Amino acid sequence: MRVTRRPRLCLAGVMAASALYATPAARAAEPTVGHLTDLVDPFIGTQNEGNTFPGAAVPFGMVQLSPDTGHRTGYDYADRRIRGFSLVHLSGAGCRIGGDLPALPTTGDVTRTDYARYAAGFRHEDERASPGYYRVGLSSGIGTELTATARTGVQRYTFPATDKANVLLNAAQSLHKPVASAVEILDDRTVRTEITGRGFCRDTPPYTVYTLTRFDRPFTAYGTWDGATVTPGARTGSGGAYLRFDTTRERAVTATTALSYVDAHGAAVNLRAEGGRSFDAVRDAARRAWAERLGTVRVTGGDETRRRTFYSSLYRSFLAPNVGSDADRRYRGWDLRVHRAQGFTYYQNWSLWDTYRTQCQLLGLLAPREARDMAVSVLRIGEEGGWLPKWGYGTVETNIMTGDPVTPFLTNAYQQGLLAGYEERAYRALKRNADGVPPAGLPMAGREANAEYIAHGFAPYDKDRPRAKLGDSDFHQGGSVTLEYALSDAMLAQLARGLGHTGDAARYAARSRNYRHVFDPSTGFFRARDASGAFTGPADPAHSVGFHEGTAWQYQWLVPQDLPGLIGLIGGERAANDRLDAFFGYERLLADPAGTARQVWMHGDPYDYYDAGNAGNADKYNPQNEPDLIAPYTYLSTGQPWKTTDVVHAALTLFTDSPAGITGNDDLGTMSAWHVLTSIGLFPVQPGYGTWGLSTPVFDRVELVLDRRHWPSGGLTVSAPGTSAADRYVQTVRADGVPYGRTYLTTGALRSLRALAFTVGPRPSEWGTAPQAAPPALT
């Protein structure tokens, strides 16, 4: 039997971690499903570069109507002026995109056309937000309310009594770089725009959105502008339009704006399909839609702050990807042609380097119908655009980030049973991606370093190599790219094996061991190689080169397909555990979990990891960024599973109900999904395959309401009665009443499971420490 170490938890650690739990006397009554929306705070993450937005949206909606304050991604809680309320935002994205058609109510003459100059002041005391609804009182005395449907945004303005109440629709300014814009006043209630922009983290090909805005009452006057020139009475312009109303008697003005990525007709179709209802009716429908989504997870226990933080993360997990097809099912593909979605809803906006690790698995669990359509949409991108995407916005490939994230994204869909009828189509697309490089004429970069990787077993690091295409280059991050390619090869091998392609399965499984080719025995860490095969850059793993947004310390655990092999390279379980303990600052963590999370793991600027070699935490766990998200679960494979609980529960203290309550960019729900899954006690430890690592939940009881069409059990209850900062260690686990000794579940087992019961206690136990308890290698 393996000898296990039982550390004592000191009193300081109990007190610091207590925010995760509450005593029974402190627990408030849990809200009903219909009131779960009251637990969501959309302002969480709007400060300190979480880059979330507080405005109105429905789950996966095309429209995310929200205020823009001057921050590059839209809204920053520290700002005090609003430039406009625009239609498109991405929750937690790290770069500017969207912000199309900012609208702002004003009074008086229209003399300024730069929204940075006509921006209105506001106070947070006059601001409120909840799922599907936002309101703010502007310093001008105008009240603004926002709500949304899937394809429309609805704004209601309450003006003071005046005959010069204006609504400014700015077509020429946005978060992205403007390329072209046109505005046309069609009649005394309706305005049409066409807006083309470009940009994300770097320049990208342009994309175009079409809008149609319908007001609930006629204008008394109007005009347009071109540049700084305002022309009263003009019906067309390139900059924007103002619409004037007399509010001396009736003070409210409501505008409904429909959005389409297809054409002007699509915007009109969407307005007819989803417009025409009162503001209050739309707001109530949005609230019901969110209540239904949030009701798929029902938690018992924890204080209201813990529940509010949890449900706010669950809310953000459902904000993306976004509907891309119009109400008539047409969508614009990556070939820039118009297609019709038959039998599925087309989705867009793919932060795959981020979401393949957490969010896609959560959506496959809680929103399988939408997750299936999302996977089909990615396949359609590959078929219509010529290659599978990496980081796509709308109709545009940005090529932001590196590696091969689309493979584990799609293989996860297969493992979760979401690709029925599409299995071979998915396999053909993934095989082409895994064995080749996109033609020069396509914007997609794919596995840019694939030829070298296949020939030599590693992607070379060449920082001076010019980018062949817009975006990031795999050659600039050869160390981490090798690890990412190898991970994807392992997941593709499992798909090939499941479909009976045994020869390919063996070939990809062999390639999945290529991570060994960038392991430097002299340092005991991964290290990038140059084109000649020589290890390159500083030998110190805390100052390594060739690792995207991280260091060799932080990437060393990114071998979920073969942790036994990695542990062997490091020197065995004892050496691996010693290194894990150093990585997490484990001894200090026991004494001060929250302090370790904030002072050892992360400190300074949220973007320190961009200069990882000089960051203060270059040899420590970085909970702010994706490469480390799986790392705490490595202890499940080293015979010390209780330490996974210690680490993830310390990391959970970083999620709070304040505007700075997210660990760095949320990246379209990635960090929020990590929070949700870890809080439940189920985490996808082998992204792209159906392996769910187990750790102690933070709630006494979690009920997952599952779709029987995809999850035959129809629901799963995860219970951990009495879980607390003091009693947080797994003593036993029972699956449907049967003792369960492994530290993981497979998706196959999860599909039929109805109850997963944890017994917890104050000290680590022998549970999960047997060699056969660890997640299996896939190689």
Image (spheres, rainbow, N blue to C red):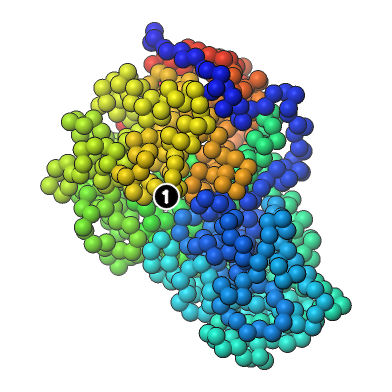
Left or right, 454 with respect to 21, comes to left
Residue at the far left: name it: 532
Residue 502 appears in which quarter of the rendering? top left
Rendered location of residue 157, percent (x, y): 75, 69
Pointer 1 residue = 607
Q: Give amino acid for label 1.
A: Tyr
Residue 682 placement (x, y as % from top left): 53, 31
- Residue 668 in percent (x, y) is at 52, 51
Is residue 398 something that shows in the picture? yes
Residue 263 visible, this angle: no
Q: How many marks?
A: 1
Residue plotted at (14% across, 42% down): 534
Q: Choose between 205 and 747: the one closer to the eye.
A: 205
Q: Is residue 530 above or below residue 722?
A: below
Q: Nearer the viewer, residue 275 or 24?
A: 24
Taking the spot 63% from the left edge, 84% from the top edge, the residue there is 111
Report which quarter residue 182 is drawn in.
bottom right
| 90 left or right of 721 in image | left
28 horizontally vs 601: left or right:
right
Residue at 62 percent of width and 23 percent of height: 724
